[in-house]
Amino acid sequence: MSGSELGEINGETAPDTLGKPGVIHALLACVFLLAAVDTVLVRRAQSHWSNEPRLFLQTLVLWACLAGLALLPAYAIRYLLRRSVPLLGSLFWCLAFPIASHRVLDSFTSFGGDTVGLRSPWPWLGVLGAGLVCLLTAFVFVRFLLSGQNARRGALLSLLGVSSLCGFLLPLQDEFLVEGDATGKPNLLLLVWDTVRAKSLTAFDEDALRVSPYLTELASQGTTFESARSVSCFTFTSHLSMLTGVYPSEHGAWILNLNYDPTRADHVAALLQREGYRTGAFVGTDVLAGHTGMNYGFETYDDIVDPPVTYTSAWGLVHDLQSIAAAHIPLFEFNGRPHWIQDFQRPADDSLSAAKRWIRNGDKRPWFCMINMYDAHWPYLPSPDATAEFVGEYAGPVNGFSYRSTGLPKGYVMNAEDQRHLTELYGAEIFELDAKVGAFLEELAVAESNTAIVVTADHGEAFGEGGSFGHHDIFEPQVRVPLLIVPPPGGEAHALGFGVRVDKMTSGIDIAPTLLGLAGVAVPKGMRGIDLARTPLTDNRVLLLEDRDHKNAKDSHFGIYRDGFKYTRTGVGQHVQGFLFELAHDPNGEFDVSDDYPELTQELATLLDDLRAQWNGDEGLQVADDGNLDGLGALGYLED
């Protein structure tokens, strides 16, 4: 097949060619077809999404832009091969092959993983196979367009129509089977203030900045648990433990395996849905993407935090090119946020607005609604008004991007003034979030309706305590979280009251059984948490911390609480170091007293091992070779 068979993009025609109008139609068909395929792949991975048209329309625009960029290499290939290939076939291959090969290579890496998998021949054989498949597809595509002079226009229009239909409609959403009848039961609202530590809220610490007036008022309507702890310091694993009532090593998910396995632990949304509740979740971060299984049991799972096109295979290549540029060109670092158009999060306004529409959608069934709000998470960039009210004068180099700021001198060590500044910026963001939540609850008037409200956080944040920043450890500011439960008015008897404060230890694993208890649903035996509305708390309750979310297991942290003491251990196997903290005298958990209590230290260390051994808590964790960890971690995939 010679190049003259398709003619040129500039409009010159030759015998038995498509001509200029035909070439334009063919180019449109090429772009529509590839965009439709990409859209269907996204819909297969995100089957919980509604079939709205913007995904396909945005994908179509992206592929059209890529087609323009692919013209130059397409012409180059034709020139090198002395015009022995059709221009349209060359263009199709130049469009499809880079995306397909990137998809193959990406399958040999993992979230937060390294590129050691790319050192075997298999991914590269996969790339070769992708190239051959694209070449064959390009050949068939061109032959299809030359299938007959009279049928050509009809074939092109048919291809455009079929591509559009597939892009808009396939696949359809999953269907849910409602088995029970929850009529008369209370609505359940779970509000997760992502990355909000108890230490910065006046309802939990009277020394905190006055940044949460609404939450403080809400606390007077329910029970405040002053000694709540998250189970980990990573968003995904902590949320999954809240929804399953088990520790991270029991449900099995961690940063290198972000997947929920229903055979390992029951999911509270599925249990409530079977009982007749309608279930919805509205999340503010891509870490909680529904395709991981986090959406299990939710009839509606709203997790589109970026433009839908950023979930396509075509955008995946754009994303990684941006990451590579940021890793090697300082100009593109952008304070640790190198991805333009896509930043993997959305403001609480969007999550709350979507939740409000869902709550008011006319369905009369009682509802369970989880809302994750990401506003207080790094970076700390409050509005000018909130900054003026809560952030004092500061002349140092630190800004809301903290240690990831490109303007911070290399190797800079933050001092007390820097820490104060960051804490105030963080507090100002909490103030804005508090106002948004207050407006949401007041507009819905859920406090006066038959609704139970649970307010908590997935983990906290450190601002220099123990020399740590962020939430990559288990110091107390990183794991002590708010927990407030406002019971529904009337209903069944429970231990929750108005303005009650409880100082006994609670955990994120208590969220699921408490929600079930409030709904009058039996708590499965496998859940290790307790129903806080009906189960008396004891002074000597034993609780665990499991921070397994590191690319190398020897960087893991584990902890256990009992009788006012906290024992922590860093590492696994031969890489172990233990510490003991007396929280009554050291509320941040910074000063090791293991030498003062050697017998207690050994007792708690043994208890930690024995408890986790009940479910093989170290399963799947491996101590990796640092020399092989040179890939995706450097591109920012290890941040939550």
Image: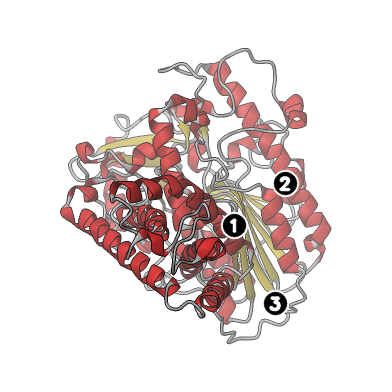
Q: Residue furthest top?
A: 395
Q: Quadrant of residue 570?
A: top left
Task: Identify residue type, mark 3.
Answer: Lys
Would you call the spot at circle 2 few (<14 residues within 10 Å), some (14-19), or many (20 or more)? some
Q: Residue furthest front?
A: 15
Would you call the spot at circle 1 few (<14 residues within 10 Å), some (14-19), or many (20 or more)? some
Vertically, is 167 above or below 584?
A: below
Kindly identify which residue carries mark 3: 185
- Numbered disc 3: secondary structure: loop
Q: Quadrant of the N terminus?
A: bottom left
Q: CA distance from mark 2 to mark 1?
A: 39 Å
Q: CA distance from mark 3 to mark 2?
A: 25 Å
Q: Residue at x 63, y 62 (%)?
A: 54
Kindly identify which residue carries mark 1: 58
**Image location of residue 156, percent across then percent down:** 52, 73
Q: Nearer the viewer, mark 3 or mark 1?
A: 1
- Numbered disc 2: secondary structure: helix
| In the displayed structure image, the side of residue 597 where residue 397 appears, left or right | right
Would you call the spot at circle 3 few (<14 residues within 10 Å), some (14-19), or many (20 or more)? many
Q: Quadrant of residue 131?
A: bottom left
Kindly identify which residue carries mark 2: 215
Vertically, is 472 above or below 182?
A: above
Q: CA distance from mark 3 to mark 1?
A: 42 Å
Vertically, is 433 above or below 362?
A: above
* Residue 259 appears anywhere in the view: no
Vertically, is 525 above or below 554?
A: below
Task: Identify residue type, mark 2.
Answer: Leu
Q: Which mark is residue 626?
A: none
Q: Nearer the viewer, mark 2 or mark 1?
A: 1
**Image location of residue 262, percent across then percent down:** 41, 72
Sequence-wise first label, 3 or 2 = 3
